Image (cartoon, grey):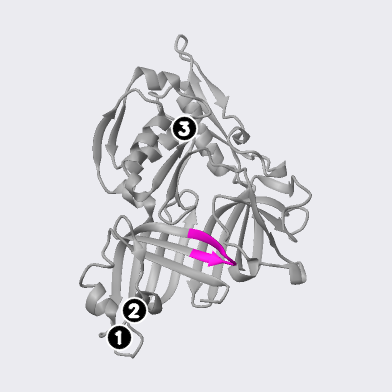
Amino acid sequence: MAENMRLLLLIGGILPEKAPHEVIEALQSVSVHTGTGEQGGFQLSFAVSKRSMLTTTLLPMGYFDPGRRVVLATIIRGEQTVVMDGIITRQEIGPSDTPGASTLTITGLDMTAVFDMVHVEFTWPELPLFAQVDLICLKHAMYGIAPIAVPSVFNPVESVLRRNSVQSGTDLEYIRELASKAGHVFFVEPGPEIGTNIAYWGPEARFGLMQPALSVNMGAASNTESMSFAFDGLSATQYSIIEVEPHTGIGFPIPIPDVSLLRPPLAARPALKLKHQKIDFGANKTLPEGLLYGLAHSAKSSDAVSGQGKLDVLRYGHVLKARRLVGVRGAGTAYDGLYFVTKVTHEIKRGEYKQSFSLSRDGLVPLLEQVSA
């Protein structure tokens, strides 16, 4: 690795340990991806041979078996960032007659994988949705998982008090079902310390501290290799639900509230919602549940402006994180300003650390005249 960058690799059971020197030396590349609405994952590629410790000892003894825990952290300019904490799900060996061409590839998922291992049949008592999420996360606390569960904007009191919830599936499936009801998201994020994780269940948080700005078309001040932007006029949709008056049987549309109730706007000129769509949320749901269900749909489709790009982490000086805010400079008045980072892919090789990223926001023209450098 470069002198101003270090990579830490830990592999083991519930409490992983630093990988042996032979494993670090054999490591050729690391790929990690994280993003909204999807499970994060990783892939490690090792150079192996018939006589290497990895093939003669570690593979036979189960060191890289599925289910083993892997933690990856980088140290850039003295700042440590945990970029992945997950579980091995697959191993592949590629023998070759060409010297140095044999490879071992290890693939895995982030800590949401431990929520998706066991099918559960359980009737939950009359508890708020966020309390159910807290209790489920406690089952996986041995992995250093601490829950942050946020109550719903519209608290569906009727549904909580009048009937129990039935779980028929894995913990991950059930938590995602609850998130859909509440208009929330669920993910497990590694860190801030090695061996710890935050399990977040709540509205997609588009506020908080900004990451250092991404600069493009600014000469020596540019810190990205490329960036491009697009405005899709058909992305923003106005949703409504149909509420049926029980006495007359007449249905009337109820527009879904603006998603700024869950996420503050990032642009001064939000995109006009050209499309209108009715949401069929089922006859058994209450009006609060229907509004929450509609908010979840509205939040996912409201971002008309998107961006993509690549950067060299050693030049940027920081590790860009998904599910955070970041500023953009140099793209012009329409596209400068704050964005939400929706996806990040880390590509790490010896002496090299690159990231590709995706951004999104609700419209054009920045709310703030300046963003943090």
Is 180 included in the stretch rendered in magenta? no
Query: 365 above or below 251?
Result: below
Find numbered disc 3 in the image and state the secondary structure of the residue it sits on.
Answer: helix
Instruction: Specify which label sits upstream in the sequence, 2 or 3.
Output: 2
Q: What span is colored magenta in the figure?
A: 74-82
Instruction: Specify which label sits upstream in the sequence, 1 or 2.
Output: 1
Depth check, front residue: 189 or 338: 189
**Label 2 Cα crowd, 10 Å radius (few <14 / some 14-19 / many 20+):** some
Are the residues flagged by discs 1 and 2 in contact, CB closer than 8 Å? yes
Image quarter hosting the C terminus: bottom right
The residue lying at 35 percent from left, 50 percent from top is: 143
Find numbered disc 2 in the image and state the secondary structure of the residue it sits on.
Answer: strand
What is the distance, in whole Å, between disc 2 and disc 3 at their CAs? 45 Å
The answer to which image quadrant residue 160 occupies is: top left
Depth check, front residue: 287 or 315: 315
Measured from the top left, where is residue 364 in percent x and y? 72, 48
Is 78 included in the stretch rendered in magenta? yes
**Label 3 Cα crowd, 10 Å radius (few <14 / some 14-19 / many 20+):** many
What is the distance, in whole Å, between disc 1 and disc 3 at their CAs? 52 Å
**Res. 97 in view:** yes
- Identify the amino acid type marked 1: Ser
